[in-house]
Amino acid sequence: METCDKIPIIPLIWLVGVGKTTTASIGKITSVVNRSIPITLPVDWYSFHLTRQVIFMKERLVGFLLMTAIVPMAVLGYLLLVYVGFFGKSVRGRAGVRALDHFVNATLFNGIAWESLSSHAWRMRHKRWAKVVIRLTDGLQSGHCQKANKREQPIVDLVTQKGLDKQSIW
């Protein structure tokens, strides 16, 4: 039985994260062959874990507050979009429809917020939902999804390269 006084925080997190071959508990690490190795957890381990939980809760709270403010404005925006569609300038209506398209893509289809549903469907054309979207849009305009993807792919590449699709709070 081996003992050690200090284990760096990074390997400890890695061991806890592996899960399939090694399980960890406070005070010992049990390997695949059920050999226990007593360890002393670093003092920072508990505060690190607590800090992650606090950040997670802050992010949830901020997200809830933002959605509480944004959803009523989105409903008003949709009603305004309907009004503009019938009586307003088509440029303003087109911008609203494009924003709604990106919203639906990001929320319902787990896409990138800077990409239209058509472009996302072309990228995921092997999936069933994408095949349905491609078939529907091809009925309106031949090759619509492919053209949308060709137009939007540089934007998607830039967004992912710059990390704009990652978490931006904390």
Image (tube, helix red, strand yellow):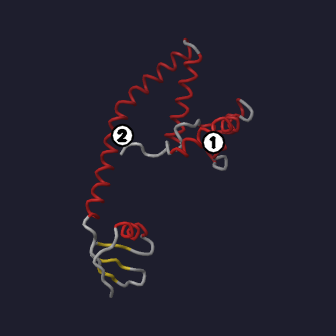
Q: Residue at x 35, y 30 (%)?
A: 69
Q: Secondary structure at mark 2?
A: helix
Please, is residue 157 above or below residue 88 in the view?
Answer: below
Q: Along the horizontal axis of the image, is 48 left or right of 17?
A: left
Q: Along the horizontal axis of the image, is 26 left or right of 96?
A: left
Q: Circle 2 is placed at which residue position?
A: 63
Q: Residue at x 59, y 16 (%)?
A: 90
Q: Secondary structure at mark 1?
A: helix
The x, y position of residue 97, in whole percent, is 56, 26
The x, y position of residue 43, in whole percent, is 24, 66
Q: Residue at x 45, y 72 (%)?
A: 20
Of residues 125 and 26, the one nearer the viewer is: 26
The type of residue carrying mark 1 is Ala
The x, y position of residue 58, in whole percent, is 30, 45
Q: Residue at x 60, y 43 (%)?
A: 157
Of the two numbered discs 2 and 1 on the same chain, state the one appearing first in sequence: 2
Of residues 96 and 87, the one nearer the viewer is: 96
Picture disc at residue 121: 1
- Point out the residue furthest to the top here: 87
The type of residue carrying mark 2 is Gly
- Residue 119, quarter of picture: top right
The N terminus, quarter of image: bottom left
Frontmost of labels 2 and 1 is 2
How far apart are the alpha carbons under marks 2 and 1? 27 Å
Of residues 19 and 126, the one nearer the viewer is: 19
The x, y position of residue 30, in whole percent, is 36, 79
Q: Residues within 10 Å of mark 2 (few under 14, many from 20)?
A: few
